[in-house]
Amino acid sequence: MSPLQKYFPVLAIVGSIVAYLWPQWLAEQKHWIVYLLGAVMFCMGASLTLHDFKRALSDYWVLLLGVSLQFLLMPLIAWQLSTVAGIGITLTTGMLLVGSVPGGTASNVICYLSKGDVALSITLTAISTCLAIVATPLLVYLYLHKTIEIPVQKMMVSIFYIVLLPVGIGVMLNRYIPILIKPVQAFGADISIVVICFIIAIIVALNRESLAIVSPILLLLVLAHNVLGLIAGYLATLLLTRDQRISKTIAIEVGMQNSGLAVALAVKFFSPMAALPGALFSILHNVTGSLLASYWAKTSTKK
């Protein structure tokens, strides 16, 4: 585990503080968010093989459970929290985006540190990422179409270019020209961490004034969204499988979202303020994930 991976939450917090104090230059880099996220997705694809996808066929029940919890629990929790708190349509949209995106790449690292099933974690991330091209826009539409216009088709196209295409290119290069992307495989996780921290800093800079007003309530809501996702994912899986290792893995996949994608979609289709929940989630889920990994790593794995 590299120093960057070990201190990911610290780097994200430091970057956010720097962006808050000196926002001018970072705010001007808004147009890079989509491309930066595509780079992270490419790094993830470069770490996968076609075998990772074939593995899904041999353990379809567990994968179906993980994907179902991912796309059912998180949007529902986001909607309920936003409705109860009455945070307004813009921030509710941001919360729904966070709840409707697939699992994040950071979940694979946290799963490894937690002594979970890393192969299952990678497969779940890959499958939910592919499904997101349809699932994410439709889920946001389902919850919000009566309130605001949701550009479903445009979101699908964007998710294809931001997520599916770079992941697919990474997988194909790994399959046919592996020597070309060995440096990416070696440093992909570190590159992703630096890029994600930069994205978070841009969002903080864009929302400097708004953060001073809404951050206390929003901070609690985003933290609750993350923690409830982890707890619900763990308990639901443990109830159905009685397998602690699988339960840890799916809990991490459900509770740790691809918040970078939520940020990119919010900025592109809604507003910078709608990206706030995603930016906060990026920081918080790595903090809670790191703490949870530290605890689980110390406990014995039992079925």
Image (tube, grey):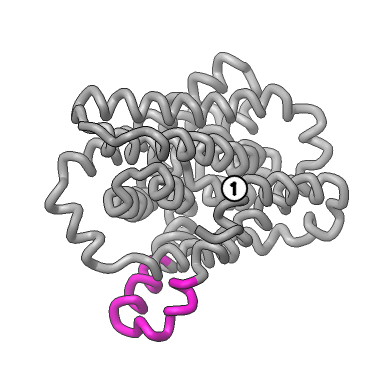
Q: Position of residue 127 (x, y in %)?
A: 30, 52
The residue at the far left in this view is 58
Residue 176 in the magenta stretch? The answer is yes
Query: Is residue 64 shown above or below 3?
Result: above
Name the residue: 49% across, 19% down: 80
How many numbered callouts? 1
What type is the residue that disc 1 sits on? Answer: Val
Residue under the point 33% across and 40% down: 249
Q: Is residue 208 left or right of residue 297?
A: right
Residue appearing at x 48%, y 54% in the figure: 154
Q: Is residue 141 visible?
A: no
Dominant SS in magenta: helix
Label 1 residue SS: helix
Q: Nearer the viewer, residue 15 or 91?
A: 15
Q: Position of residue 13 (x, y in %)?
A: 70, 44
The residue lying toward the viewer, choosing from 203 and 247, is: 247
Q: Is the residue 138 above or below the residue 157 in the image?
A: above
Specify whether residue 45 is painted magenta: no
Q: Nearer the viewer, residue 240 or 214?
A: 240
Left or right: where does residue 56 sit relative to residue 180?
A: left
- Per the rendered image, the range of residues in magenta is 167-186
* Residue under the image location 60 percent in, 58 percent down: 4
- Quadrant where the C terminus sits is top left
**Image height check: is 218 above or below 194?**
above
Q: Is residue 221 above or below residue 272?
A: above
Q: Residues within 10 Å of mark 1 (few under 14, many from 20)?
A: many
In the picture of the structure, the residue carrying the numbered disc 1 is 263
Inspect this view and state whether residue 271 appears: yes
